[in-house]
Amino acid sequence: MPRRLGPAVLAVLALSACGAPAASGPAAAAVTVENCGRQVVLDAPPERVMVIGGEAGTLVAAAGGTDRISTFAPLRGEPLGAAEAELTARPLAPIGTATDISREFVLGRTPDLVVTFGLEGTSPEELAELGIPTLIVAGYCGGFGAGQSQRSGSALEDVATDVEMIGAALGTSDVADAAADDLRARVEAVRARSTSDGRTAAALFVSGPDSPLGAYGNLGMVHEQLDIVGLGNVFGAEAERYFEPSVEALIGTAPDVVLALFEPGDTTEQEVRDSVLARPELAGLPAVANRDVVVLDFFHSGHGTLAVDGLERLTAQLAALP
């Protein structure tokens, strides 16, 4: 994967007015970072960072900014990987759904920077008018709903670039740039071990043994994860992040492997795998007939650093198939 340049960072020096007394020290520098097509200006290094969502949390942690977090609002039960201990040590305000991210919810925490997967009931522009800059996780520039329909380039590269961008915003680029390079190296290590032999996979979201099955098109992180491990996404022509195909459409794709994604809670990976294998409507799939079903926690196909963990877990499970 060719490495992209990190986000443009523009230092704007505050100039003294003509004839004003000389300052006692160097003027503070404002910093501008590019985020989701916006130029976000930070007049001073943030000290009260509100982080909404675990994906944003893992990015801030990787960028070396955990000690700046004044409020961390993960989704309840959301895994945080290696960053769990440091993130959960910060002041917590867990949320149940995206609808909890109201204007009042944000303003009540008096942040000087918000890093989030999205906003509900307010916008980055409105918060900027109130003096609060906002950084959106790049994977959600087009929105955070199932119908997300805006993305270009590499989703995994976006994770590394987000870490660099947040580091630039916080003034922790030394830590952030090293972390971003490590994420890229891990992705390339998986790519180097993978072979593309023409096998295909269907990535399905399984919420229960009898629930409708959702599938992932070419706008989801999982599409790129499948590609890197050498599997073609049978729904790769669908310009959707997530949709619900008919059973007939799914059977017609005849995937060699099923990747079952699930939301952690009261179920285990083995229970999810068993439920897919037991579905009578899927009996005709080559993947089910051959028991080539792998399972991944849904949050490991998101847009934080856990996506790289998920890529490595997926590789290990595929290697263990008969």
Image (cartoon, rainbow, N blue to C red):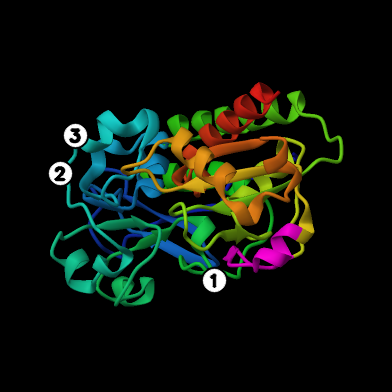
Q: Say how many tags the image has.
A: 3
Disc 3 crowd rating (10 Å Cα; few below 14, some 14-19, many 20+) is few
| Camera-side residue of 93 and 160 | 93
> In which quarter of the view is residue 152 placed?
bottom right
**Viewer-nearest of discs 1 and 3:** 1
Could you give the CA–CA distance between mark 1 and mark 3, rounded to whole angstroms? Answer: 34 Å
Query: Element at badge 2?
Result: loop
Q: Position of residue 42 (x, y in %)?
A: 36, 58
- Location of the C terminus (image quadrant): top right
C-alpha distance separating marks 3 and 2: 7 Å
Rendered view: 172 above or below 36: above
Residues tagged 1 and 3 counted as in contact (Cβ below 8 A): no
Q: Which numbered circle lies on residue 147?
A: 1
Name the foreground residue: 182 vs 228. 228
Is 247 in front, or is 83?
Answer: 247
The image's mark for residue 91 is: 2
Q: Is residue 185 above or below residue 303?
A: above
Residue 79: percent from the left, percent from the top?
35, 39
- Residue type, mark 3 in image: Ala
Amino acid type, residue under disc 2 in the picture: Pro
Q: Position of residue 310 (x, y in %)?
A: 54, 36
Quadrant where the N terminus lies? top right
Which residue in the structure is indicated by mark 3? 89
- Residue at the image point whose x is 44% and y is 45% from the top: 299
Magenta stretch?
Answer: 238-251
